[in-house]
Image (tube, grey):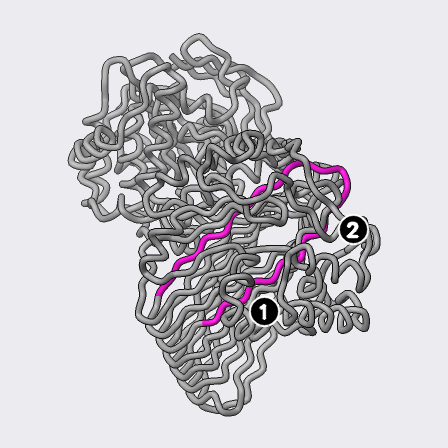
Amino acid sequence: MLIIKDLHAKVEGKEILRGINLTINAGEVHAIMGPNGSGKSTLANVLAGNTSFEVTKGEVTFNGRDLLAMPADVRAKEGLFLSFQYPVEIPGVSMINFLKTAVNESRKYHQLKELSAGDFLKLMREKKELVQIDSQLTNRSVNEGFSGGEKKKNEIFQMAMLEPKLAILDETDSGLDIDALRIVANGVNLLKRPENATIVVTHYQRLLDYIVPDVVHVLYKGQIVKTAGKDLVLELEEKGYDWIKKELGE
Amino acid sequence: MSDQNSLLNEVTGRDYRFGFVTDIETEVIPKGLNEEVIRLISAKKEEPEFMLEFRLKAFKKWQTMKMPEWAQLKIPEIDYQDIIYYAAPKQQPKYESLDEVDPELLSTFAKLGIPLEEQKMLAGVAVDAVMDSVSVKTTFKENLAELGIIFCSFSEAVKHHPDLVQKYLGMVVPPGDNFFAALNCAVFSDGSFVYIPKGVRCPMELSTYFRINAKNTGQFERTLIIADNDSYVSYLEGCTAPMRDENQLHAAVVEIVALDRAEVKYSTVQNWYPGNKEGVGGIYNFVTKRGLCKGESSRIYWNQVETGSAITWKYPSCILAGDNSVAEFNSVALTNNFQQADTGTKMIHLGKNTRSTIVSKGISAGHSSNAYRGLVRVAAKAENARNYSQCDSLLLGDHCGAHTFPYLEVGNQSSIVEHEATTSKIGEDQIFYCNQRGISTQDAIGMIVNGYAREVINKLPMEFAVEAQKLLQISLEGSVG
């Protein structure tokens, strides 16, 4: 589904990604872990097409197509979803209007009929139940005045609405209490399909107690330095990132 | 960053799509302005003596006045002797049905998407279409007449209701008020007149579409709205103009008088031709709009969405004379390319317990300049007057400018005056967030701008609100259609 080859990227002149290689197949859950500043969020943003980051080298194919050649909105319409670490507020734009536009833009792109207001609201009700989001939130402006936990739940709700092929969860666990964490993780698990894939970007192991990864990668200084099965999470938890640094001879 | 700017340039740099000129025979008088021309205008319109006197008095004042220079505007020199001051579509007299109206004119309205046929059928909207200077067709007049409501062209009002015109004309905006108002008083050709009798609630939104058409013709509209005791009316003004190479002058005057407990809501969607991407052409819009809350507990609301004109100089204001009177000014002003706007309001509190609210939302894109200028004055006798002002500016890109000039003059200790101002840029992170959900940059900007302006758009009557939302989005593309 996603093949990343020798990906390099800069932000504000500083090289953050220094040769990432990664292959993700349909049905898999990959965890990308690593200490702060290792490039985890940069990787998530580069894949989503954030123009603040400059790709200097490498290639990425998504379902056989050149991902880097697509503008961000096309990547989204092709089925790539990013759950933001810090979702922004858009004052005055209602969640309903925002999501209706998003869903229908994607439907148009795939030459499907736009959803009527009635069908859209019905879909929204179903998905709200699925991810257990407070129905009041969708009557407000996009993320405006939402608590940290509400914002993260809202991200998962949007993911449920858009039904992406590849979901990238960028530090979705940060700022969540244990109940919210469980709800969010539960939502992600319910949305899992054999034809979809998920990348969980996280610093800690606790989200991975709920969303169990098939493959775990450790990102360090812009490179993937270790790849293993889910047991790597426990090992990291026990030994800390210093263990990786030691292994690398630092 | 530079990617973002080039995208912004792309979506804000399109052409105006309403550029067309209608070929209708027009009766014009020669260029230039002098006493003879004014007498000729008055004679052509078969006006009573008091109107001619009003015009001549204003002309004398105007000759002693200078164009105001205090605005944050660069106004090219205007040669007032190079303007035609009167143009009327031929094919007189008036028509009883649409079948008799020049088909060319009807197709112009069709191009604008406001065919009269449809307008007639639109629930509750009476249309008085003003094209150039003479009112062409007034609909719904009979229904309104049953309630005693007068809604007609200004010329008709002068003919059939001279007492009302003589009593109220110039009461709110006197002939010598300012340079452009004086010019309007001297040469105005036509406009709209509304009178709502005592205790009557006007059952429909009254609406006028203005257009500028005859070549080189300055347009000087005059609108007078009188709401008698305990009455209510909602008035809509909307306009588009065809493409022009030379600049065109537009100096309208709107006067509103609200008597005891009367309520007047005046909503505008303004979309005059703004000039091309390089800033060539476009309308100069120098408007004087003022309401007088004359009676106790009277209310006047100005709601406006401004996206057009090369230069806008406009301050819809209210004089709160009656005790307990209320005034509101809600405005969205959008400038793009090389447009310049200096706009705002004046709230003059004279009566006791008067309340005014100002919500101004400026949006600047391209190389445009957008200034808010607001005056709140509380007179010594205006016990317990209250004002709340909120002025927000939104910038798109790095080449535009926004300025806020609030003036507060408070002469009474018991009054409360509050002012808040913010300036923000559309965040790249907001656009990226929308992109990531599959929304294109162009749609994202339209959505974010509409969200920002929602507070004001929500004040507009329903059908206007929909139009205004589209207009904001379209204006940022630099085109209309």
Residue lying at 67% horizontally and 51% vertically, measured from the top left: B219
Residue nearest the observer in this picture, B380 or B406: B380
Of all chains, the one bearing label 1 is: B
Amino acid type of the residue that numbered disc 1 sits on in the rendered structure: Gly
Residue B83 badge: 2
Q: From what the image shows, is residue B287 above or below residue A126?
A: below
> From the viewer's perspective, is A103 left or right of B301?
left
Residue range in magenta is: B232-257
Residue ID at (56%, 72%): B166
User: Residue A4, image x and y in percent?
Assistant: 47, 16
Q: Is residue B4 above or below residue B52?
A: above
Farthest residue to the top: give it. A64
Quadrant, the N terminus of chain B: top right
Q: Position of residue B123 (x, y in %)?
A: 32, 43
Query: Is residue B242 rendered magenta in the image?
Result: yes
Are the residues flagged by discs 1 and 2 from a single subunit?
yes
> How many numbered circles does the render carry?
2
In reply to whether residue A173 is colored magenta, the answer given is no
| In the displayed structure image, the side of residue B274 where residue B210 appears, left or right | left
Q: Nearer the viewer, residue B423 or A228?
A: B423
Chain for mark 2? B
- Residue B336 x %, y %: 63, 44
Identified by mark 2, the residue type is Ile
Q: Which residue is mark 1?
A: B374
Q: Secondary structure at mark 1?
A: strand
- The residue shown at (19%, 32%) is A122
- Left or right placement of residue B257 versus residue A116 in this view: right
User: Residue A32: horizontal and vertical position, in percent?
Assistant: 38, 28
Q: Earlier in the sequence, mark 1 or mark 2?
A: 2
Q: Identify the residue shown where x is 50% and y is 70%.
A: B164
